[in-house]
């Protein structure tokens, strides 16, 4: 064996030593608890797969799963529609306007989502500015907005929007401006150049942004619990309620496993087609 | 009226300095014109104004007798090739080349035929279905060229198209571009900072400097009779020297004395700038010829450049390699040149 072939082993061992604390941390605080949840889902209170049967077949649980997926799909769609123009302006125009927009997105991203959730509570509350405005325009009494699916969808969209913007921005920033000039010189109208060139080239950002937002959304706990509808819970809220109110650890664990499987499945599909390393642009 | 005319074009970016400062040009149909100049000289900005990507601050552009100032880029029917190719990465080679035809609503069968013809001209017929990124730089640039030509543009603009290629490939592509120009006869404007490229390819060269046009001429005329010291120094290697014309056709170098020069009859008297090509100087046999002190020797293989001084005047000499063997630094040589090798640039200030 030549020396050049044997040398790479040393960095490998070094990498392993450097990674060791993280690996130990993950095993102790992630894999072990996860195994415990998995174990509880089939042993609590007695051994069997009955919880899974219930979670997947019981109409009430199925409703929660479908509501969660529906809300997440809605949030993801609205995020794409709002974030795309914002990211486009930020990436293409740049300069001061771009910097200010990016700053606004980042500030919103860095603000605790608990704070942002409470902000929405005030905005959408019964005596909040939106209600008063609707009253003033003749919608009296104004519709109940807080503690509905509407309020949780709005708040989740706001909370996850920066992530979508950043995923799109990362892809759009890499699009060569000369390509758009070339398209124009070749006879493409601005709209046609966008449809045929820019949009297809930015589509990977839509896919990865949507994947991230959707996956985060189906597992989101705080916001739906605080301002969502108690009758149209999302999975995480449901899991929390099972544990806190009914001490039903088995059912809660089974639901958590279902949520995990759905999440992993989405990421697996993404990885199959695009590669997980591209998820963050 | 010429085919493409630029009238008093100016471009500034809000400052006091003009990126392009009062450029007027007349380009004939079918001509191959090169914009030559250092970076920041305004050549690319002028090109981008012709393409419509930049709006002139003032001045006008007319194509085939029609003012195109208000026409947006996609309606100008001008092909542009960029230095970084700017191919559409998500389309095959054939779809890239077919793009301008699809934008013009050309029937499918005709698109296929015209794409095939252009790919044959750039010798990439076998790569029609390839992804652009699988091709080499030279091949990608030929795809870009085919794409910019397939819709039969009125003018083809090339913005330093060979700048990203290595030397051998660049020379091969120069020949290729000339051949394609001969075959299709499209009016072509070629931007480069490489004076050799400009010399070998162009019908006419426009020399840009500081946003202004220094000289417009055929390559050889530009080489033999530069109008300004900048052109004399930028196009080819040159000795630009301060001299004095005392009258009567006698020209003197300060500290050297009278030198051999054939002056034009209208040459003004007083201080002048003259240009003397390094390769027009040769070694003299006699001992009364001017003395040149060798201070440095640069070997190019086929030729040797001697850097030194004629009296106190710095001078470069290019000799064929065979004539320059056995020369050493510090040696004093006798040199001569034919009187008509001296070109008077203009009056020195």
Image (cartoon, coloured by chain):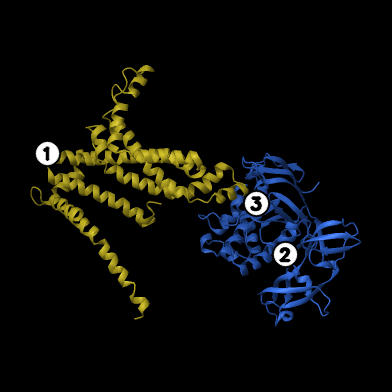
* Front position among marks 2 and 1: 2
Viewer-side residue, A14 vs A231: A14
Of mark 2 and mark 3, the one earlier in the sequence is 3
Binning the other alpha carbons within 10 Å of mark 1 as few (below 14), some (14 to 19) or many (20 upward) gives: few
Residue at mark 1 to residue at mark 3: CA–CA distance: 73 Å
Q: Where is residue B36 in the image (x, y as percent from the top left)?
A: 69, 57
* Front position among marks 2 and 3: 2
Viewer-side residue, B281 vs A199: B281
Cβ atoms under marks 2 and 3 closer than 8 Å: no
Q: Is residue B212 something one can see in this rendering?
A: yes
Q: Residue shown at 77%/54% (left/top)?
A: B216
Binning the other alpha carbons within 10 Å of mark 2 as few (below 14), some (14 to 19) or many (20 upward) gives: some
- Chain A shade in the render: yellow
Helix, strand or loop under label 3: helix
Residue B31 lies left or right of residue B141; in this view the side is: right
Q: Where is residue A164 in the image (x, y as percent from the top left)?
A: 38, 43
Residue B44: image tag: 3
Residue at mark 2 to residue at mark 3: CA–CA distance: 21 Å
Residue B205: image tag: none
Task: Give the residue furthest to the left.
Answer: A46
Cβ atoms under marks 1 and 3 closer than 8 Å: no
Where residue A72 sits, quadrant-wise, is top left
Where residue B283 sits, quadrant-wise, is bottom right
Q: In the rendered image, which residue does mark 1 sit on? A: A246
Q: In the rendered image, which residue does mark 2 sit on? A: B236
Q: Position of residue B215 (x, y in %)?
A: 76, 54
* Front position among marks 1 and 3: 3
Q: Residue shown at 89%/62% (left/top)?
A: B249
Chain to which mark 3 belongs = B
Q: The blue chain is which one?
A: B
Chain to which mark 2 belongs = B
Q: Residue shown at 17%/38% (left/top)?
A: A241
């Amino acid at each position: 064996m030549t020396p050049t072939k044997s040398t790479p082993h040393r960095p490998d061992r070094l990498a392993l030593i450097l990674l060791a604390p993280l690996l130990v941390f993950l095993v102790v605080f992630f894999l072990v608890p996860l195994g415990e949840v998995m174990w509880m889902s089939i042993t609590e209170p007695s051994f069997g797969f009955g919880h899974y049967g219930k979670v997947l077949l019981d109409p009430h649980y199925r409703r929660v799963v479908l509501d969660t997926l529906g809300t997440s799909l809605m949030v993801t769609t609205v995020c794409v529609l709002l974030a795309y123009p914002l990211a486009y302006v930020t990436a293409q125009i740049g300069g001061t306007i771009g910097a200010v927009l990016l700053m606004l997105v980042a500030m919103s991203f860095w603000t605790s989502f608990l704070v942002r959730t409470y902000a929405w509570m005030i905005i959408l509350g019964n005596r909040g500015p939106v209600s008063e405005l609707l009253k003033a325009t003749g919608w009296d009494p104004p519709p109940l907005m807080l503690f509905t699916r509407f309020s949780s969808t709005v708040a989740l969209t706001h909370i996850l929007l920066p992530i979508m913007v950043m995923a799109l921005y990362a892809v759009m920033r890499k699009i060569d401006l000369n390509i758009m000039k070339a398209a124009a010189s070749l006879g493409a109208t601005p709209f046609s150049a966008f449809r045929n060139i820019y949009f297809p080239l930015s589509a990977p950002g839509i896919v990865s942004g949507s994947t991230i937002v959707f996956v985060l959304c189906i597992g989101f706990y705080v916001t739906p619990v605080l301002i969502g509808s108690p009758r149209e819970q999302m999975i995480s809220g449901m899991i929390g309620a099972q544990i806190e109110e009914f001490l039903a650890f088995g059912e809660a664990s089974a639901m958590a496993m279902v949520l995990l499987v759905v999440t992993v499945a989405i990421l697996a599909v993404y990885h199959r087609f695009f590669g997980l390393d591209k998820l963050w642009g | 009226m010429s085919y493409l005319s630029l009238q008093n074009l100016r471009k500034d970016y809000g400052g006091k300095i003009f990126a392009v400062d009062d450029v007027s040009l007349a380009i004939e149909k079918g001509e191959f014109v090169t914009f030559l100049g250092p970076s920041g000289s305004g050549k690319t900005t002028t090109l981008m104004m012709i393409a419509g990507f930049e709006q002139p601050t003032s001045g006008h552009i007319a194509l085939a007798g029609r003012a195109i100032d208000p026409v947006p880029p996609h309606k100008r029917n001008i092909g542009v090739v960029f230095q970084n190719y700017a191919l559409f990465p998500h389309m095959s080679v054939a779809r890239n080349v077919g793009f301008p035809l699809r934008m013009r609503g050309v029937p499918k069968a005709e698109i296929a035929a015209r794409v095939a013809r252009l790919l044959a001209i750039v010798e990439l017929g076998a790569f029609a279905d390839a992804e652009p990124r699988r091709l080499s730089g030279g091949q990608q640039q030929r795809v870009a060229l085919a794409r910019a030509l397939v819709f039969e543009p009125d003018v083809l603009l090339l913005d330093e198209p060979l700048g990203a290629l290595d030397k051998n490939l660049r020379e091969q592509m120069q020949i290729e571009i000339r051949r394609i120009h001969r075959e299709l006869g499209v009016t072509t404007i070629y931007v480069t900072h490489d004076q050799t490229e400009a010399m070998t390819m162009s019908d006419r060269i426009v020399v840009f400097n500081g946003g202004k046009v220094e000289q417009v001429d055929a390559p050889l005329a530009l080489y033999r009779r530069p109008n300004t010291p900048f052109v004399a120094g930028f196009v080819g290697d040159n000795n630009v020297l301060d001299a004095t014309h005392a009258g009567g056709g006698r020209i003197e170098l300060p500290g050297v004395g009278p030198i051999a020069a054939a002056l034009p009859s209208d040459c003004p008297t007083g201080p002048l700038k003259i240009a003397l090509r390094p390769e027009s100087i040769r070694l003299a046999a006699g001992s009364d010829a001017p003395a040149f002190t060798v201070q440095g020797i640069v070997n190019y293989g086929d030729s040797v450049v001697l850097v030194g001084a004629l009296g106190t005047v710095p001078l470069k000499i290019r000799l064929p390699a065979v004539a320059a063997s056995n020369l050493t630094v510090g040696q004093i040589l006798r040199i001569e040149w034919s009187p008509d090798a001296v070109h008077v640039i203009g009056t020195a200030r």
